[in-house]
Image (cartoon, rainbow, N blue to C red):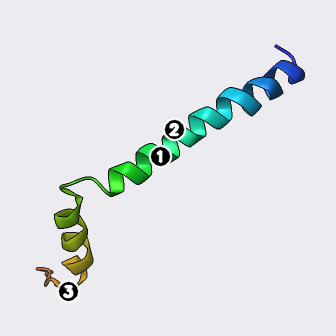
Amino acid sequence: MNYSDLRHFADSYGLVFMSVVFLVLVGWTFRRDAGKHHDQAAHSIFEEEDRSDG
């Protein structure tokens, strides 16, 4: 496999692969049960932690 073959592969199949990965990640963010996880993550900074400074 030389540079020309690798470039052709990256230009065609690499673009398709990256597009599919992008769409899966965006879809994962907007799935049905994601709302409660987003709310939990947004409010987690306000929760008290049990720390023993000793």
Q: Say how many tags the image has.
A: 3
- Relative horizontal placement of residue 36, taking residue 8 as reference (left or right): left
* Residue sitting farthest toward the top: 1
Look at the numbered discs 2 and 3 and tell me whether their residues touch, using CB distance below 8 Å: no
Label 3 neighbour load within 10 Å: few <14, some 14-19, many 20+ = few
Q: Earlier in the sequence, mark 1 or mark 3?
A: 1
Q: Are marks 1 and 2 in contact (CB under 8 Å)?
A: yes
Kindly identify the residue that appears in the image at 47 percent across and 46 percent down: 23
Q: Check residue 20 in the rendering and tell me which mark sits there, or answer none.
A: 2
| Residue 40 sits above or below residue 13 on the image | below
Real-space Cα separation, disc 1 to disc 2, in angstroms: 5 Å
Instruction: Work out which quarter of the rendered image holds the N terminus and state it.
Output: top right
The residue under label 3 is 46
Residue at image location 13% in from the left, 81% down from the top: 52
Residue 45, numbered circle: none
Front tag of 1 and 3: 1
Amino acid type at mark 1: Leu
* Residue at figure coordinates x 20%, y 54% from the top left: 32
Residue 3 in which image quadrant:
top right
Task: Determine the secondary structure under disc 2.
Answer: helix
Query: x, y (%) of residue 6?
Result: 79, 23
- The spot of residue 28 in percent (x, y) is 34, 50
